[in-house]
Image (cartoon, rainbow, N blue to C red):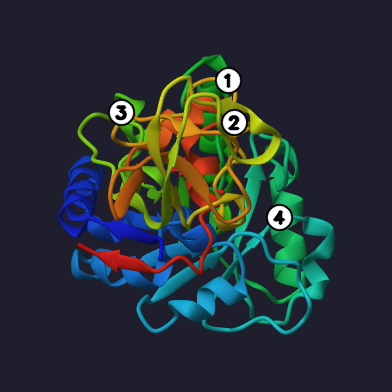
Amino acid sequence: MSVIKLNQKLYENNLKQIIQKVGDPSKIICVFKDNAYGHGAKILAPIPKKFGIDFVAVKNEKEAYEIQDLFKKILILSHKPNGNENSQFIYALNEISKVKEYKIGTKIHLKIDTGMHRNGVFVENIEDAFLKIDEAGLNLEGIFTHFSSADEMDASFFIQKQKFSKAKMLAQKKYNHLIFHSFNSAALFRAHNIPKDEFFRIGIAQFGYGDERLKKILSLYAHKLSERILNSGQSVGYGRSFSTDKKIKIATYDLGYADGLFRYNGKGNLTLANHKNILGKISMDSFSCEDCGEEICVFNDADIWADFFNTISYEILVRLHPDIPRILV
Ligand SMILES: *Cc1c(COP(=O)(O)O)cnc(C)c1O
């Protein structure tokens, strides 16, 4: 059976690095959406808790219920209002025209569109939004924004920061209890100055990506299903995309694209953690390679697969099927 091993010490190292940068664990919002970026939300959640982190963000209510008992505050990022919101949770208000569709008294954080242009209100409309929120009887607890290019630190990052400062100023004129947040992992680890009056929404950095002080915590393992000797000229897998030019011993391992691996088509050199190539196409439930024993590490650095597939580590990680067992090591 395939398995995901999560290194607890390295995860703790990353949390310590993040806490050191932020200066205060109570200002950190651990982003645990999409099963903690494929790592496994339930198994990791008790660890930030130990470090005094009491606030997480998730995608939807289903994810919030899974870790509800552990955290004082849970922000739900992608919720469509339905009048049945849970008074324990905080909901991101992404669309101001839907403000009347929430249950009265629902805790919300208003999203400000400073340039990402996915959702939220423009700074110019923020005062109008405050009126509508008050009118609808919602409980506004915070305002936040998201950067479109924190990993590049280009001019648009600074323009967005300026717009958010304006939003904070307008909010402070009307309310004195709101909290603010804008920085994600890349912004936290790249910016020279971090805001003193904000919380920080940190996702991928927890898992070790984006800075050399951080250590990648996830290793994905597969187990051998069978083995055979191939003679020169024989192929393996669909479409015969690989055939050997010498006698080799190959093995087939129990992890495929249905488990969340990208479907490698057999072209180019996609390597495992031990630098051996995957041989032939990845199947739905298995792949083949030179026989490497009963257990093989598929990857322990998603950046390598991300480079190969021309994507980002987030996408490689988040696809890992929730049914793959996760263990702390
Ligand atoms: C996913 C997400 C984050 C976390 O981003 P990282 O780059 O993983 O730190 C922060 N804020 C919002 C709104 C998100 O959707």
Which of the numbered marks, if any, corresponds to residue 156?
Answer: 1
Measured Cα–Cα span from mark 1 to mark 4 = 21 Å
Measured Cα–Cα span from mark 3 to mark 1 = 16 Å
The crowding category of the residue bearing disc 1, from other C-alpha atoms within 10 Å (few below 14, some 14 to 19, many at least 20), is some
Measured Cα–Cα span from mark 3 to mark 4 = 28 Å
Query: Can the viewer see residue 113?
Result: yes
* Quarter of the image that includes the C terminus: bottom left
Which of the numbered marks, if any, corresponds to residue 94?
Answer: 4
Amino acid at the residue labelled 4: Asn
Whether tag 1 and tag 2 are in contact, CB under 8 A, the answer is yes
Whether tag 4 and tag 2 are in contact, CB under 8 A, the answer is no
Amino acid at the residue labelled 3: Asn
What residue sits right under mark 2 in the picture? 148
Side of 54 where 92 appears, left or right: right
Given this view, does label 1 or label 2 mark the residue nearer the observer? 2
Q: Earlier in the sequence, mark 1 or mark 2?
A: 2
Q: Quarter of the image holding residue 215?
A: top left
What residue sits right under mark 3 in the picture? 193
Please identify the residue farthest to the front as the structure is shown.
Answer: 231
Q: Earlier in the sequence, mark 3 or mark 1?
A: 1
Amino acid at the residue labelled 2: Ser
Measured Cα–Cα span from mark 4 to mark 2 = 16 Å
Q: Earlier in the sequence, mark 4 or mark 2?
A: 4
